[in-house]
Every structure is written in structure tokens, then in C-alpha cells.
């Protein structure tokens, strides 16, 4: 079993697009809303919404469409989108957890590490419940925990505090530019999830957790290993 280095004991994960494929459901719901408003919203543009809160996402779509809404209208439409999203995730199953995630989380904890989930989504707990992921985390923080949005590091700092660790003792896993910036701003190690070209500031980028072992991640962070997984396109 991997001997966890003295330096790293905390592992902090974003949810949507990192642990489960919920980013696609957010896109479907936002796209439906954009269609209702006559705003063009191709899937590539969804990259820019990753990590934003519900209200910030709505405001971006309004900005793209050159539309104005009162605060009451915004609350109404944010709610409408949320109802659509909740209907989509209501029937999620453990099969929708990304490959390799469970075994990686298991390995971390068997090696004495602690795990935290830190998501900007207020639906994080519902998703964790329906995919049976709750027991894999020592700490769970959803979108109601932090007051400041990424790239402010508050969401990760709260997770580190709850784990009783310093940021430098934790590795953050995030799939979004804002998430990477938030981790760096907080003094965390950061592994990007996805394509390296989208996450140029991440210390390292891996495509996901399939065939990923704890030793690989520690090598990437501390030894600058050049594994093929780090060269995710
Ligand atoms: C909110 C946004 C989503 C996404 C998540 C963070 O989720 O609506 O588009 O950016 O934050 O991953 P929710 O509406 O579930 O709070």
C-alpha cells in the first residue's frame, strides 16, 4: 500500500465533471433555459459556466444574450432551471460515477488519507446520495458553504479547515479554470481533470481516475513524473 508522504494527507474533490458526469445535466438544463430566451448556447460555451454558482451562471447567459431581468425574474428562472436539473438527476445511479473514482477514494482512505468533497452546487448532497458516494467522504461541503465564488479559495479553505489540515498538505482535483485558480490562490496542490489545453495553470492534468493510483498522483505532484496520464490532451 502507498505510504502517504508526510506532506499530503488531504484530498479535496470538486463534484460536477470530476466525480460524476453531472456537468452534462447542468448543460441540458441551462441549454433549455437559453433556448426559452432565444440565446445561442453551444456546448463549448458551457466551459465558461463550470464552477459558477446558479445565479452567476444565469447572469452569464443573460449577458451573452444581451438580456435584462429584475432580481425577482432571475430568482424565478434560476428556480425553473433547478427544477429541470433536479428532474434529470433524480434517477441517477452509482453507474454514473466516473471510472476509477471509487477505487481511488478507497485507496486514499486505506492509506490513511482524508477525503473532502467541495462543490459549488447546492444539489451536491442529492447527487452524492443517489450515486451512493456519501460514505466515501470525510467532509462534504456544498454550494451553501462558501460565500465567495471561485477563483476565491474559500470553498477549498473551508474543506482544509474541516479536515484539520493546511492547504499545502492537500491536493485539490478540479476540472475548471476557475477551480484551478481557486486552488492556487489558496496555496493548494492542484491536479486538473480533463484536457491539459483547457487547464494551462494546473500543476498537472489527468484525464480522470481510470487506472489512477495514489502513488501516480503523489509522483506527479512531488517528483514531477512525466506519466502518460499527465499528458492528457
Ligand atoms: C450550480 C450551477 C451549475 C454548476 C454548479 C457547480 O449548481 O447551476 O451550472 O456550475 O453550480 O458545479 P446548482 O444549481 O446545483 O447549485
Image (cartoon, rainbow, N blue to C red):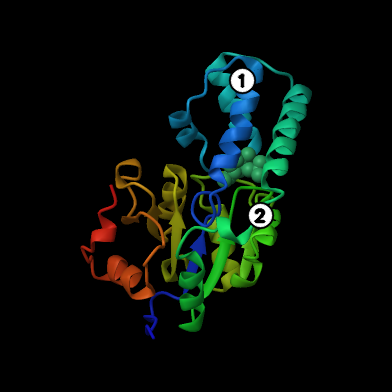
Q: How many marks?
A: 2
Neighbor class of circle 1 (other Cα within 10 Å; few <14, some 14-19, many 20+) is few
CA distance for labels 1 and 2: 25 Å
Q: Looking at the picture, does residue 30 appear above or below residue 21?
A: above
Q: Is mark 2 within 8 Å of ligand 1?
A: no
Residue 225 x, y percent position in the rendering: 22, 66
User: In this picture, is 47 found above or below 6?
Assistant: above
Residue nearest the viewer, comparing 143 with 158 = 143
In the picture, the disc for residue 190 is none
Give coordinates of residue 71: x percent, y percent: 74, 24
Q: Is residue 189 left or right of residue 17?
A: left
**Near-viewer residue (102 or 108):** 102
Q: Quadrant of residue 198?
A: top left
- Regarding mark 2 in the picture, which secondary structure is present there? helix
Q: Which mark is residue 35?
A: 1
- Label ID, residue 127: 2
User: In percent of the image, x 53 and y 49: which residue is there?
Assistant: 21
Q: Where residue 230 sits: x, y (%)?
A: 28, 58
- Indicate the position of residue 169 as horizontal and vertical percent values: 43, 71
User: Do the residues bearing badges 1 and 2 touch, measured as CB atoms within 8 Å?
Assistant: no
Can I make out residue 56 in this image?
no
Residue under the image location 35 percent in, 45 percent down: 199
- In the image, taking residue 43 as reference, residue 201 lies left or right, namely left
Report the residue at 56% width, 74% height from top.
164
Amino acid at each position: 500500500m502507498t505510504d502517504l508522504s508526510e506532506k499530503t494527507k488531504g484530498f479535496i474533490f470538486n463534484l460536477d465533471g470530476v466525480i460524476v458526469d453531472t456537468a452534462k445535466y447542468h448543460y441540458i438544463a441551462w441549454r433549455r433555459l437559453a433556448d426559452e430566451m432565444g440565446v445561442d448556447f453551444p456546448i463549448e460555451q458551457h466551459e465558461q459556466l463550470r464552477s459558477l454558482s446558479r445565479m452567476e451562471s444565469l447572469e452569464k447567459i443573460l449577458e451573452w444574450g444581451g438580456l435584462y431581468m429584475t432580481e425577482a425574474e432571475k430568482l424565478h428562472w434560476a428556480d425553473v432551471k433547478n427544477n429541470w436539473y433536479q428532474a434529470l438527476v433524480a434517477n441517477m445511479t452509482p453507474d454514473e460515477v466516473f471510472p476509477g473514482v471509487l477505487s481511488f477514494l478507497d485507496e486514499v482512505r486505506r492509506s490513511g488519507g482524508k477525503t473532502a468533497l467541495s462543490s459549488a452546487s447546492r444539489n451536491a448532497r442529492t447527487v452524492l446520495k443517489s450515486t451512493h458516494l456519501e460514505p466515501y467522504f470525510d467532509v462534504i461541503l456544498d454550494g451553501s458553504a462558501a460565500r465567495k465564488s471561485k477563483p476565491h479559495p474559500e470553498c477549498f479553505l473551508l474543506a482544509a479547515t474541516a479536515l484539520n489540515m493546511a492547504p499545502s498538505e492537500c491536493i485539490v482535483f478540479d476540472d475548471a479554470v476557475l477551480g484551478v485558480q481557486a486552488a492556487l490562490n489558496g496555496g493548494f496542490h492542484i491536479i486538473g481533470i480533463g484536457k491539459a489545453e483547457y487547464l494551462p495553470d494546473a500543476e498537472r492534468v489527468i484525464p480522470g481516475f481510470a487506472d489512477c493510483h495514489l502513488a501516480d498522483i503523489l509522483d506527479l505532484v512531488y517528483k514531477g513524473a512525466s506519466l502518460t496520464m499527465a499528458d492528457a490532451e
